[in-house]
Amino acid sequence: MSCRRPTAPFIVYNVVGLLGLLRPALTSGQDAKRPVERAPSRAVELDIPYANGGDERKLDLYIPRRERYATIVFTFGGGWHTGSRKSVAPIGAKFQDAGFGCALPSHRLSPKDKFPAQIEDIAAAFAWVKRHIAEKGGDPQRVFLMGHSSGAQLSLLLATDPKYLAEHGLSRRDIAGVVGLSTPVDLKPRAERKGFGDALMAGRGAEVFSRDVEVMADASPIRHVTKVMPPVLLIVGDRDFPMLEGDARAFVERSRGLDLSATLYVAKDRDHMGVVRSLVEDRSPIRDQVSDFLNEP
């Protein structure tokens, strides 16, 4: 993988390559439901429907061997048009080993399904976890959102724009926190300087938003920063797509201006894929930052 700073953010992933980067998933299996009062065994429950539909509306759930654990709803990256929960299975297993529950949802993809289908699916997946994790031994008050790239955009948008969770009788206060890895926070094309949205419009990346500038603006988490938002940790690599760091700084500054908890961590010697790959490494500063955030009271 090149260590050169990319000149343009072409949001195209090779899912097979991502699987190779993250290493094979650990052994998985099916387990029956357990009473809340019993400590759960380490288990993986696969292909759970979180909404009506096919495989794109299912999740895999990684359950640790402990009680009242915090749970992460992790959304894969893939430019809103490729990937699935299976591509990030090693991340679920790694968090499970660390004592966290981890739900890996799939979501509908472009070009078949346009935005907001993707964010509607992640909202439904979060709602399913929120309502069922206690049955698996988890703490429903500690359900976090996390994602990489397009998955981070969906996670952060869910935490900033209230309309998607409202469809499930939930609010932003039901989210314990958000970790965004290489997050596109501003998708609106800019006249004054090239941004992430301009790169999307220059290629096929904007197709999921029907190439509609107003749809892209409304899908931008930075547009929805208000006084109600869970704690946020944004992580970018110093060799990531060039505009992501500046946009993340703008998001953090706007959040802190409203006395919200928002932090930016810039990882040294990490490019776009290196940021997410760090989650399955045994030791990395990014893993330390994420663990500290998840364990903070």
Image: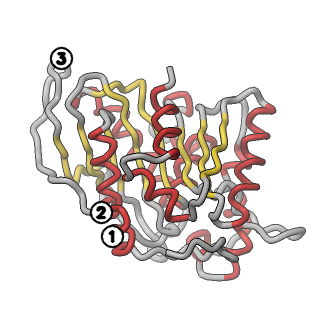
* Secondary structure under the numbered disc 3 in the rendered image: loop
Q: Pick whichever, 32 or 65, lies toward us.
A: 65
Q: CA distance from mark 2 to mark 3?
A: 34 Å
Q: Pick whichever, 15 or 106, lies toward us.
A: 15
Q: Which mark is residue 52?
A: none
Amino acid of disc 2 = Arg
Q: Earlier in the sequence, mark 2 or mark 3?
A: 2
Residue 185, by quadrant, is bottom right
Q: Pick whichever, 116 or 200, lies toward us.
A: 200
Q: Earlier in the sequence, mark 1 or mark 3?
A: 1
Badge 3, how many Cα within 10 Å: few under 14, some, many 20+? few
Say which residue label 1 marks. Answer: 20
Q: Position of residue 280 (x, y in %)?
A: 37, 52
Say which residue label 2 marks. Answer: 23
Q: Position of residue 233 (x, y in %)?
A: 59, 40
Badge 2, how many Cα within 10 Å: few under 14, some, many 20+? some
Observer able to see residue 206: no
* Residue 194 shown left or right of residue 185 in the figure: right
Q: Residue furthest top?
A: 37
Q: Residue at x 49, y 75 (%)?
A: 1
Say which residue label 3 marks. Answer: 37
